[in-house]
Amino acid sequence: MPAMRRASGTMFGLAYGDALGAPTEFLTMKQIARRFGERGPADLDGDPALVTDDTQMAIAVGLALLDALENPPFTPDLITPMWRRRFVDWLDSPENNRAPGNTCLKACRGLAAGKPWVEATVAGSKGCGANMRVAPVGLAPGLSDETRAGASQLQAALTHGHPTGLAASELTAFAVRWLADGMDPAGLPAALRARCHEQRTVYHGDWLGELWQRPGMDAPETFIARGWDECLAVLDRLDEALAAGDRTSDPCAVTGAGWVAEEALATGLLCFLLFPDEPAEAIRRGAASSGDSDSIACLAGAFAGAHLGMGAWPDGWSARIEYAADLARIGGAWD
């Protein structure tokens, strides 16, 4: 049996979802149905099919990880300047014209100005920019669970300083890792819930430094627990939506519109888990949504690709997607 190439499936899957969801991001469900049909966009548009900042920043995370893993040991001191440089390069790129989020722009401007990242980050933001780009951390080989957790939270914290953005990013990375390792998708919600409980008071100080120090926080454990609690709450909503099993209605109706990190995680997971063996349908469901459709479909594509591998995606898409060479470089390094 040929290798499933799950890393490539993840990287290309997130880009496919991003490209499919980009044209629907600011449309209502009725507008989407009129333009694309009830099931949403069926095919990539254009050659190349353009992606958004979601894929651009996921590539930035992945390329920095490739560089870091070639220069072990993998530590926060090693990867932080690499991620800083890649994020600033993204900020300055002429291709950074895909409606990027204000949080990412503001924080990256601070990074470009040389501020310490704990000052550059937007402390109150838990936008989905924290976790739309984290899939490469889930794929990176050879990391301990503690290192993967710290790294996934750090890449979020460089721009989004809210504890829920950190926790949702860790859950996203671990979902990708577990699926790539062969976890049955049906077991994913319970595994994520258990992770929330296990990690609720774990603050990765080596990675996050003094990020927790802000008004109202008496200890790092108090800070991070808020993020895990909000993720647990949205996992309750995910369970509710999965129990209903509605594969035709707006996926944002129960789990949320996805503009914030925990809702993007839950709604992306919902789209994947409603169609665990139909990856193209999973990202179509994410694209046909009333919320942040490109980020929702991007996450659904990452989960589907980690589960099913590169061969599950439609033939011909890999030749048409924007940034195919970068996606192939990252995926091929870790397949």
Image (tube, grey):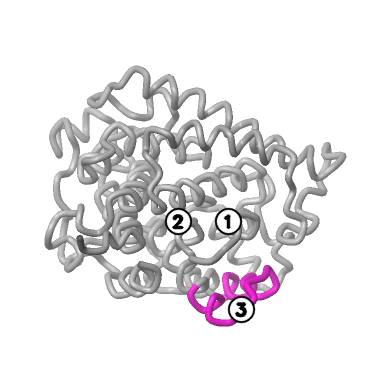
Q: Is residue 315 left or right of residue 12?
A: left
- Residue 271 against residue 308 in the figure, above or below: above
Residue at image position (80%, 56%) is: 210
Of the numbered discs in the image, which one, if any, rests on residue 135?
Answer: 2
Q: Are marks 3 and 2 in contact (CB under 8 Å)?
A: no
Residue under the point 42% across and 67% down: 59
Q: Which of pointers 1 and 3 indicates the residue nearer the eye?
A: 3
The residue nearer to you, when weighing 137 against 52, is 137
Q: Identify residue for label 3.
A: 72
| 108 is higher (above) or lower (below) than 226 | below
Placement of the N terminus among the 4 image quadrants: bottom left
Q: Find the magenta span and give its range.
A: 66-85
Q: Secondary structure at mark 1?
A: helix
- Element under label 2? helix
Q: Residues within 10 Å of mark 2 (few under 14, many from 20)?
A: many
Image spot of residue 314 (x, y percent):
15, 54
Is residue 123 found inside the magenta-colored segment of the image?
Answer: no
Q: Nearer the viewer, residue 159 or 303?
A: 303
Q: Amino acid at mark 3?
A: Pro
- Secondary element under disc 3, as helix, strand or loop, is loop
Q: Position of residue 332 (x, y in %)?
A: 33, 72
Separation of marks 1 and 3 at Cα, in angstroms: 18 Å
Quarter occupied by residue 116: bottom right
Q: Earlier in the sequence, mark 3 or mark 2?
A: 3
Disc 2 marks a residue whose amino acid type is Ala
Asked if residue 67 is among those painted magenta in the image, a careful observer would answer yes
User: Which residue matches tag 1?
Assistant: 152
